Image (cartoon, rainbow, N blue to C red):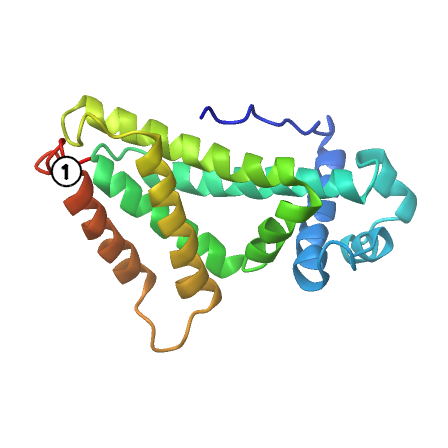
Amino acid sequence: MASDPEIQIKQPRTKRGQVTMRKLLDAATAEFGERGFHEASISSITSRAGVALGTFYTYFQSKDALFRALIVDLSGQIRADASAAIAGELDPLAIERRALHAFLEFASEHKEIYRIIDEAEFVDPEMYRYHYTTIAGRIAQRLRDGSKNDALRADIGEIEAWAIMGMNVFLGLRYAVWRAADDAGLDDVSRTANELLERGLSRGTSETAR
């Protein structure tokens, strides 16, 4: 199954406009995260952002449009954090460890992402699918790149990418959102998950075991 096409959100041309949009997106993250989509209001979002109610409609046509933009924004932040974490890294398994660690840190700082994405399944199914298919697509591409240098099995594909994403999502839920004081550190979590991948993805694993 191919990934959904990238969904683009029109960005303001001026620096001032970019700052205002950032305020609205950050306020929406807090509002939707705390109250949920249906209870959240545009007036509350603009109040949190410190902008006039009328200003909202310069950037978004509706609450639904803002919600869509927020999903794109959160997905983009995850992508940017992962890209920064894996920059310069050549070992494909180390890349997945670093990418997971970056996501765990992001989820620790933005716990509301889980409520927002979960609500998207019912509020805007297209954006719900967009979020996960684009992330899985990026993982699949990393795995394909890793298989080219014989570090990973040659038969790795979409199924493995979705499996890794599913693992990462629930590790984030358990060790970032539901984190307890005596839990393993994020380094330990990402290392343990990476050891699991190493046993399942390394070339030494039988390629005929499917």
The quarter in which the N terminus is drawn is top left
On screen, residue 199 versus residue 72, left or right, reads: left
Residue of label 1: 202
Residue drawn at x 57%, y 53% as measured from the top left: 113
Residue furthest bottom in the image: 182
Q: How many numbered tags mark residues here?
A: 1
Residue 112 location (% of width, % of height): 59, 58
Residue furthest right in the image: 54
In-front residue for pair 17/176 = 176
Q: Quadrant of residue 36?
A: bottom right
Residue drawn at x 53%, y 42% as measured from the top left: 77
Residue 121 location (% of width, % of height): 62, 46
Three-letter residue code for mark 1: Ser
**Is residue 150 placed above or below 118 in the rendered structure?**
above
**Is residue 74 placed above or below 89 in the rendered structure?**
below
Residue drawn at x 50%, y 39% as measured from the top left: 132
The answer to whether residue 102 is seen in the rendering is: no
Q: Residues within 10 Å of mark 1 (few under 14, many from 20)?
A: some
On screen, residue 166 versus residue 149, left or right, reads: right
Report helix, strand or loop for mark 1.
Answer: loop
The answer to whether residue 72 is seen in the rendering is: yes
Q: Quadrant of residue 17?
A: top right
The quarter in which the C terminus is drawn is top left
Residue 183 location (% of width, % of height): 34, 72
Residue drawn at x 84%, y 35% as measured from the top left: 61
